[in-house]
Image (cartoon, helix red, strand yellow):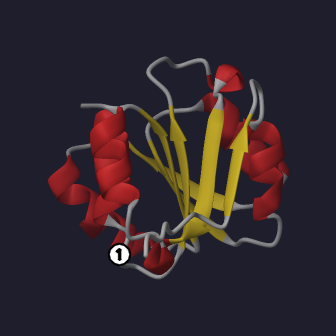
Amino acid sequence: MSCISLPEKIYFKQGCLSIALDELKGTKRAFLIGNSEFVESKLNELDIQHITYSGIPEKCMEEADLFEPDVVIAIGGKAEMQMLALLKDKGVYLVAVPTENDIEMCADMVIIDRSDKLPLLELAFEEMFA
């Protein structure tokens, strides 16, 4: 028998990022991987405390541990998705916005799930950005 494990929510349509981020209402702390003025603005609107990380992957987990986020948001390409995959065992919500450009309003897909329930995340993004 075959089985596939799907994330809790997958949004796909041009401009879906704003709608997907509305799902974070009630979240207290967000760790943002990659620079995004749009996402930072939306988090401010939702009154979510956040920090942005754009350093090297090796320090990502350390910085996230210090901040103790409820949600980790990664927007960008292979490097950002790999850093998100490093945090998959933290038991927090993960928001993945895979895109090869910096135009967040044009993000075509947003994936949201609990990190401990998303075992295929690393494999999926390895294939997507290979």
Residue 6: image location, x then y, percent: 56, 64
Residue 93: image location, x then y, percent: 57, 70
Disc 1 target residue: 65
Relative to 64, is 29 on the left or the right? right
Q: Amino acid at mark 1?
A: Asp
Extreme residue toward the left, this view: 58
* Residue 17 appears in the rendering: yes
The residue shown at (20%, 45%) is 56
Placement of 10 over or under 99, stated as above or below: below
Extreme residue toward the front, this view: 1
Relative to 79, is 30 on the left or the right? right
**Alpha-carbon neighbours of circle 1 within 10 Å: few (<14), some, or many (≥20)?**
few
- In what quadrant of the picture does the C terminus appear? top left
Residue 24: image location, x then y, percent: 75, 62
- In what quadrant of the picture does the N terminus appear? bottom left
The residue shown at (77%, 35%) is 16
* Residue 47 appears in the rendering: no
